[in-house]
Amino acid sequence: MAFDVVIVGAGPAGLAAAIRLKQAAPDLSVVVLEKGSEVGAHILSGAVIDPVGLDSLLPDWREGDSPVAQPVTADRFLWLGPAGALRLPNWLMPPLMSNHGNFIASLGDLCRWLADKAEALGVEVFPGFAATELLTDDAGAIVGVATGDMGIGKDGEAKAGFQRGMELRAKYTLVAEGARGSLTKQLVARFGLDEGRDPQKYGLGIKELWRIAPERHRPGLVQHSFGWPLDNRTGGGSFLYHYGDNLVAVGFVVHLNYANPHLSPFATFQQFKTHPAIGSVLDGGERLSYGARAITEGGWQSVPKLVFPGGALVGCAAGFVNVPRIKGSHNAILSGMLAADHVA
């Protein structure tokens, strides 16, 4: 199948690029591939969203049915000890860490909403298809991707439902597959995109979504903490965000350069939830879902060269998480828009 633009990944960056392409040039044919069973299935961020990206992409987003509806009402920063917590005064924190004017929302819900907007503009969105192979021309430039074969047995042989992957060819390919994606690694190596850059660094983020007792719910509260149960040699921290119908997103991030061979990020997260400052919120609640994902943490100095012959990297594939702000979705949206402007 031939398109003007193929986008790999239906996260904020990929969908923003698709929408912007159609805004700039409605006649372009654009397809978005998503490896998850549905758009949003692999989006696990417990998100505090800076609306600057949405304001640029869809200026009237506040007037419709957007799932981004809970403004931040309070900011808390805690240092945790084994039995207690010390709240740090907000005036001591750098201004960039303030969440005034931001929103709490499910990033998965936001992506589903953005996918509807993209499809309404004529973008084709194909969930359930993983891009597994880069296609190149005789000169070595990228000319699209191929999806993986389906219906392969454990022995590597084709089963009765075998279906060959599809070649999706395009004038430009935008790779928005998230942190440490398989195609991104191939592109970085093939075109030397990391030359002169620091190595990328990663963290592991574990998140659970809880429905808690109404009397414990504080809509709009953003709480970040550090300290226990991590030791002083191990980087990481936690978050707890109140939004929606008595929902709380609780999560823990461990920087993957930790040296303790006995440390288990999952076990550390479970231990963290027993702290009085956290357990008192979750007590009597119900865990609805959980998951984990890698996070790019290298920052500006680790961002690779973004363009290659035939396409570009956007979003977390390029490492656009702003670690001090504990945010990245706005950068993902803006990077997808910028790439789309140039492609158009």
Image (cartoon, grey):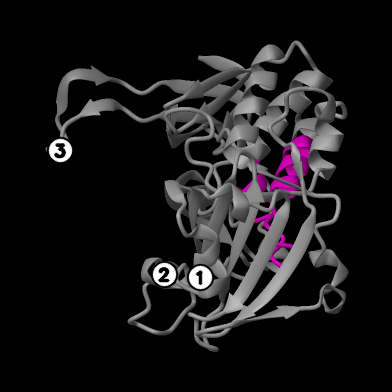
Q: Is residue 145 left or right of residue 343?
A: left
Label 3 amino acid? Answer: Lys
Counting from the top left corner in percent of width and height, residue 156 is at 16, 36
Is residue 315 part of the magenta span, yes or no? yes
Task: Kindly indicate whether the residue at mark 2 contacts the one at mark 1 (C-beta within 8 angstroms).
Answer: yes
Residue at x-position 73% and y-position 64%: 300
Pointer 2 local density, CA inside 10 Å: few below 14, some 14–19, many at least 20: many
Counting from the top left corner in percent of width and height, residue 333 is at 73, 40
Q: Is residue 4 above or below residue 332?
A: above
In the rendered image, is residue 103 in sight?
yes
Question: Tag 2 or tag 3, which sits nearer the N-term?
Answer: 3
Question: Residue beneath label 3, please?
Answer: 154
Question: Residue beneath label 1, please?
Answer: 254
Label 2 amino acid? Answer: Pro
In the rendered image, is residue 309 in sight?
no
Counting from the top left corner in percent of width and height, residue 245 is at 60, 39
Give residue 95's quadrant in the image. bottom right
Q: Which mark is residue 285?
A: none
Question: Residue beneath label 2, please?
Answer: 265
Residue at x-position 21% and y-position 17%: 161
Residue at x-position 64% and y-position 54%: 241
Q: CA distance from mark 1 to mark 2?
A: 6 Å
Q: For this rendering, which residue is in front, 19 or 235?
A: 235
* Residues rendered magenta in the picture: 312-339
Circle 3 SS class? loop
